[in-house]
Amino acid sequence: MAEVLVYVDHVDGAVRKPTLELLTLARRIGEPVAVALGAGAESTAAALAEHGATRVLTHDASEYADYLVVPKVDALQAAVAAVSPAAVLVPSSAEGKEIAARLALRIGSGIITDAVDLEAGDEGPVATQSVFAASFSTKSRVSKGTPVITVKPNSAAVEAAPAGGAVEALAVSFSAQATGTKVTGRTPRESTGRPELTEAAIVVSGGRGVNGAENFGLIEALADSLGAAVGASRAAVDAGWYPHTNQVGQTGKSVSPQLYIANGISGAIQHRAGMQTSKTIVAVNKDAEAPIFDLVDYGVVGDLFDVVPQLTEEIKTRKG
């Protein structure tokens, strides 16, 4: 069976969930070979092997931390040359998509971004994408070169599948462009204790109907009762009620959780484009004609100030 390269997104050896999802998808089309770069790369091997990686190619160098993107592209190009894979899978983050685009250009291949599913095909991997604000699904394959495919978080359930996971050193020669853009400083993001928005299995969002920054505590309380991330509509963000980093929508972040709860959000196309691929959608809105109700699996017509606190308390009661 052909091998499939999986780019590992990790922090000092702690593998992030989207990478484990990629390993699940990679097993559908071949044998996963993981590529882990930077500090802690070798420490990723146990988690990667537990989830199906037959081999783990590692390389550590200061360039991965000191410079942007290009050193990682150099390393993936070296991995492609060493493995001759059937495909290269990359998490569909902002950095991941830049890495994938640069790699595809380097190796003369086609690229598919924001895939939500993968399957084996007679002429190579077939990727499913949600397009036109998730109104349609398309199936595509790359017809030239080694397919480079980025996959959206939460597109597949993480499945354990123990494999060898033998650690092998990857030989990498950095290009002249690798040191072109230097990182001059980093500021750690303040932790809320909640999941990362784009990776969360459950997202609870608030919109214009929350009616003020002081009322987002209701949304946060519901999210915390579910172990969820907190999102916000563009209207709420533009009003200064919640940080832009939490905006869900066409000009914010795209999410695809197992459960999405929209509170006081009308359902404008701009917002729908960022959450329409969620597996189950629940909306609370006092306007029975709100467009969001055309999209949901479950809808509650009611005032969020009445509904959300009751829902939060019911969840706490059932959990406790």
Image (cartoon, helix red, strand yellow):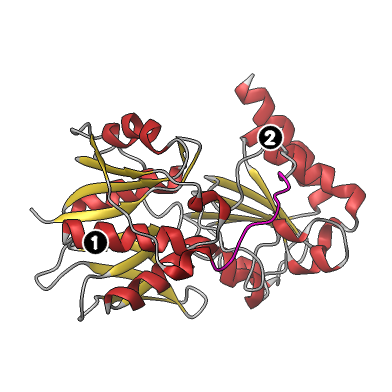
Closer-to-camera residue (158/162): 162
> Separation of disc 2 and disc 1 at Cα?
37 Å
Residue 293 appears in view = yes
| Mark 2 touches mark 1? (CB < 8 Å) | no
Closer-to-camera residue (163/255): 163
Q: Name the residue that disc number 1 marks.
A: 80
Residue 97 appears in view = no
The amino acid at mark 2 is Gly
Q: Main secondary structure of the magenta part?
A: loop
- What number is the disc on residue 203? none
| Residue 10 spot, x, y in % from top left | 47, 43
The numbered mark, 2 or 1, whose residue comes first in the sequence reads: 1
Tell me the residue at 81%/63% (across/down).
Answer: 236
Looking at the rendering, in which quadrant would you find the C terminus? top right
* Res. 251 image quadrant: bottom right
Tell me the residue at 55%/61% (across/down).
Answer: 68
Magenta stretch in the rendered image: 180-188
The amino acid at mark 1 is Val
Report helix, strand or loop for mark 1. helix
> Which residue is situated farthest in the top direction here?
320
Tell me the residue at 80%/63% (across/down).
Answer: 237
Is residue 187 in the magenta section? yes
Q: Name the residue that disc number 2 marks.
A: 193
Tell me the residue at 40%/55% (across/down).
Answer: 155
Q: Height in image: 50 above or below 29?
A: above
Q: Would you call the spot at circle 2 few (<14 residues within 10 Å), some (14-19), or many (20 or more)? A: few
Q: Would you call the spot at circle 1 few (<14 residues within 10 Å), some (14-19), or many (20 or more)? A: some
| Residue 305 spot, x, y in % from top left | 84, 48
> Which residue is situated farthest in the front direction here?
176
Q: Is residue 169 left or right of residue 254?
A: left
| Residue 257 spot, x, y in % from top left | 51, 51
Q: Is residue 183 left or right of residue 54?
A: right
